[in-house]
Image: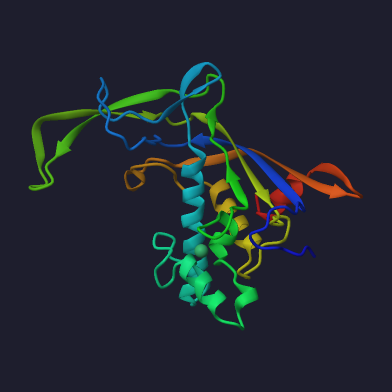
Amino acid sequence: MTSFEYGNFDKFDYKYTIEYDIRTLSPLSIRSGESFLGPIDNPIIRINFNGKTVPYIPGSTLKGIFRSETEKLARSLSKDPSIVCDILNPRGENGELKRKKDAENNEKTKSIYLPCLICRIYGGPTYASHVYFYNAYPKENSYSIGLIRRVSISRITGSQMPGRLFDCEFVTPNSLFHGKVVIENIDILSPITDSLSESSLFNRVFSNFTKGLIPIGGMRSAGYGDVKIENIKVNKMYILEGKLDTKDVTNEYLSIIGV
Ligand SMILES: [Zn+2]
């Protein structure tokens, strides 16, 4: 078994690359969150890609969804509240910086500080990520953009405000994006068990993602953001007898995540 040196990435053991397509099953709404003055009040996020301005799904959006799904899962599997640190408050009682400082101030625990399980997968204030989500870009001519005119609802009375219409963009259902995630030094070919391990947690979330159980983007409560994952390819890169080698492990991985 590999010896992990937490927080130290100089040591390369192995790396998995999962490539996949995301097919939208309902409208997809990912916005930049910035106010925008233009013909459309609520544009979707776009980027320049291969000489065109196209909608995309940011890697940070995908990573955020995976992190929060993994947190939920870890909490459901463990009664220990410290299983998931308070990522928004790193200096607070259950924050990673506080936990590290406490461990270092205690002679007995000095050498065994470990970030919480979630930071060990996705990174945190004390620790680099083992998982890198790349932006998912639309496949050639495989998307379209729709526009819906919505009515403003008064925050005060909860009723429609006459004359206050705004246009909202979305990516239409049946659009296709291509994405990639790289996982370093977490052995995702380990079978899924009930254990609270990095690979089990990541694989369960990835399995739910491929089965269409994890919607993405905004307005999810209104049925937006349903997606299905297709065309998964998994590659393992590792060092064998001092040489870098790669291997297609797609079938092995699909059977592990039950797809
Ligand atoms: Zn943490």
Question: Residue 8 is drawn in which quadrant?
Answer: bottom right
Q: Position of residue 139 (x, y in %)?
A: 56, 25
Q: Position of residue 84 (x, y in %)?
A: 49, 67
Left or right of 78 in this view: 242: right
Q: Residue at x 39, y 24 (%)?
A: 145
Q: Residue at x 44, y 61 (%)?
A: 87
In this view, which residue lies farthest toward the bottom? Answer: 108
Left or right of 199 in this view: 42: left
Left or right of 230 in this view: 148: left
Total marks in image: 0
Q: Position of residue 200 (x, y in %)?
A: 63, 62
Between 175 and 5, the residue placed more toward the observer is 5
Q: Residue at x 81, y 43 (%)?
A: 247
Q: Which quarter shows the N terminus?
A: bottom right
For residue 213, say whether it is visible.
Answer: no
Q: Residue at x 27, y 33 (%)?
A: 35
Image position of 42 with respect to 127: above or below: above
Question: Residue 114 is drawn in which quadrant?
Answer: bottom right
Between 69 and 223, the residue placed more toward the observer is 69
